[in-house]
Amino acid sequence: MDNQYRIINQCLQLLKQSEMPTIKKLRVEIQLIQMKRLLLNDALPSEVRSGSCGEEVFEGLLHQMKGICCGGYDGEALSELMERISGMLSILGSEQASPPH
């Protein structure tokens, strides 16, 4: 989890340095902060942290953020990023909402 949290912080740092319009930055930033909040939940199952939302998923997110923040923030690339983040949020959030076994 520490590495996933660190990757989200890297994404936020990239976002701050990007030339992306402010409103778009804010939309992405809100989603990333929400993901950080979900990652801090101790009840998050380890299979989520290592499987469906494991490190390689977060590394992919970071790679995508680097591409967008280095000038590739056209509508389609940003939409794909937001879809990816939404998918990750729903995985993390649904695991939190499910009752303990």
Image: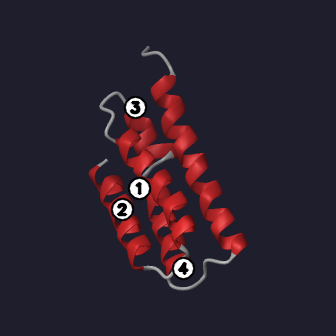
3D distance between C-alphas at marks 4 and 2: 15 Å
Residue displayed at 53% across by 77% down? 20
- Of callouts 3 and 4, which one flags the residue occurring earlier in the amino acid sequence? 3
Counting other residues with Cα less than 10 Å from the Cα at mark 4, is it few (<14), some (14-19), or many (20 or more)?
few
Residue designated by label 3: 45
- Of callouts 1 and 3, which one flags the residue occurring earlier in the amino acid sequence? 3
3D distance between C-alphas at marks 1 and 2: 9 Å
The image's colour scheme reads secondary structure
Residue displayed at 50% across by 34% down? 93
- As drawn, the label of residue 67 is 4
Q: Secondary structure at mark 4?
A: helix
3D distance between C-alphas at marks 1 and 4: 19 Å
Counting other residues with Cα less than 10 Å from the Cα at mark 2, is it few (<14), some (14-19), or many (20 or more)?
some
Residue displayed at 32% across by 53% down? 5
* Amino acid at dot 1: Glu
* Amino acid at dot 3: Pro
- As drawn, the label of residue 7 is 2
Q: Is residue 56 left or right of residue 73?
A: left
Q: Is residue 74 above or below residue 53?
A: below
Marks 1 and 2 close (CB-CB < 8 Å): yes
Q: Which sits in the foreground, 23 or 66?
A: 23
Q: Secondary structure at mark 2?
A: helix
Marks 1 and 4 close (CB-CB < 8 Å): no
Marks 1 and 3 close (CB-CB < 8 Å): no
- As drawn, the label of residue 55 is 1
Image spot of residue 8 (x, y percent): 38, 59
